[in-house]
Each structure stands twice: as C-alpha cells, then as structure tokens.
Amino acid sequence: MAADDRVTGPPAGVGGPDRPADPAFYDDLARRLRDAHRRAAALGADVRIPVIRRLLGVTEMVKRDPARASARLDELLAGLPPDAPDGPTR
C-alpha cells in the first residue's frame, strides 16, 4: 500500500440518494476494508477463507452501493476478533 492512498474524490456519478458524496466516507471505508483484510489474514485457514470471501463480496458491493457495503462491513468487522495479530506481510 502506498503511504498516501486516500481517495481524491468520490467516483464519477456519486451523489445520488444511495451514494454519499463525502470523500471522507470513502477514505474511512477504504481504511476499514484494509483493516478487515489485515485482521482476516491473521485468522486460521478454516476461518480465514470464508471471511475473505465475504470481504470480496463487500468490496464488489462498494462499486454499486457504498452505503450498504459500509453497513455490511460493519457487521463483518463486529464478528472478527478485535485483537487479532497482524497477518503475514506479502
């Protein structure tokens, strides 16, 4: 990851009723997705694989419905252990 991976602005066409126009929303969403992937990488293989599949679904949903994806990510993060050690560096 680059040191400065903030979103420079909302994607084109953003600002509809289901698409927040606030760039801070997308910065926070990207940070939480990155954190979720790091926490998932630290899980055992039997748990990690289904969690990563769910994360990929949330990541795909961000393209279509960012607000709903954010809510699903919150649910997923609530189910992960809060103090998982850092995952392997790739």
Image (tube, rainbow, N blue to C red):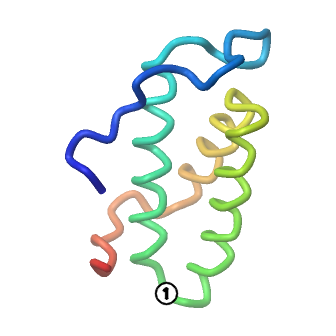
Q: What residue type is labelled 1?
A: Gly
Q: Eyeballing the image, is 77 above or below 68? A: below
Instruction: Locate residue 12: give its quadrant.
Output: top right
Furthest-left residue in view?
A: 3
Which residue is pictured at 46% across the width and 79% down the height? 43
As rendered, which of 49 and 24 lies closer to the eye? Answer: 24
Residue 46, given in percent of the width and then of the height, sits at 61, 89
Which residue is pictured at 28% across the width and 70% down the height? 86
Which residue is pictured at 43% across the width and 31% down the height? 28
Q: Eyeballing the image, is 87 above or below 20? A: below
As rendered, which of 76 and 9 lies closer to the eye? Answer: 9
Residue 80, given in percent of the width and then of the height, sits at 52, 61
Residue 71, given in percent of the width and then of the height, sits at 67, 35
Count of numbered badges drawn on the protein = 1
As rendered, which of 42 and 12 lies closer to the eye? Answer: 12
Q: Name the residue under label 1.
A: 44
Furthest-front residue in view?
A: 12
Residue 53, given in percent of the width and then of the height, sits at 69, 70
Label 1 sits on a secondary structure element that is: loop
Q: Eyeballing the image, is 20 above or below 70? A: above
Quick check: 48 left or right of 3? Answer: right
Quick check: 84 left or right of 20? Answer: left
- Quadrant housing the N terminus: bottom left
- Quadrant housing the C terminus: bottom left
Quick check: 65 left or right of 4? Answer: right
Which residue is pictured at 79% across the width and 10% down the height? 17
